[in-house]
Image (cartoon, rainbow, N blue to C red):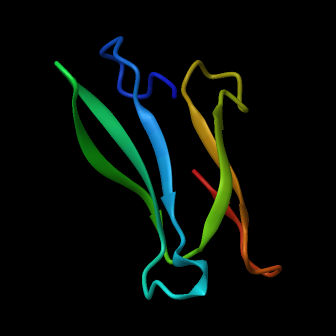
Amino acid sequence: MAESSGDGLPDILGTLTGLGKRPAPETLMYRSRGGGGFEPVRVQQGVPTHEAKVADLTSNDLPDTIGQTEWPDRHSDG
């Protein structure tokens, strides 16, 4: 969970890898709409990612995402 949209509500980062069975793996940020509702926003597609994390890695007060991929020659960050 992280606040990623500037509205002060907690958002949720999720990955859909399919463990090699999903034709279009993707990482999504589920942005809170308040009242328990969330809207999916695609962070990246095409790189199966797991163990994704959210943190301010660049010290710009904005959330960054990073995850471990299932492929050694590809990376996933946003």
Count numbered badges in the picture: 0
Instruction: Tell me what residue is drawn at x 31 percent, y 49 percent.
Output: 41
In the image, residue 4 sits, relative to residue 6, either above or below, namely: below
Q: Position of residue 25 (x, y in %)?
A: 48, 74
Q: Position of residue 72 (x, y in %)?
A: 83, 79
Quadrant in which residue 59 is drawn: top right
Q: Position of residue 55 (x, y in %)?
A: 66, 30
Horizontal placement of 2 versus 55: left or right?
left
Instruction: Tell me what residue is drawn at x 54 percent, y 71 percent.
Output: 17
Quadrant in which residue 50 is drawn: bottom right
Q: Position of residue 32 (x, y in %)?
A: 28, 28
In the image, residue 26 sits, relative to residue 21, either above or below, namely: above
Quadrant in which residue 6 is drawn: top left
In this rendered view, identify the residue nearer to me: 30 or 66.
Answer: 30
Instruction: Tell me what residue is drawn at x 30 percent, y 15 percent.
Output: 7
Horizontal placement of 56 versus 5: left or right?
right
Instruction: Tell me what residue is drawn at x 54 percent, y 25 percent.
Output: 62
Residue reaching furthest to the right: 72
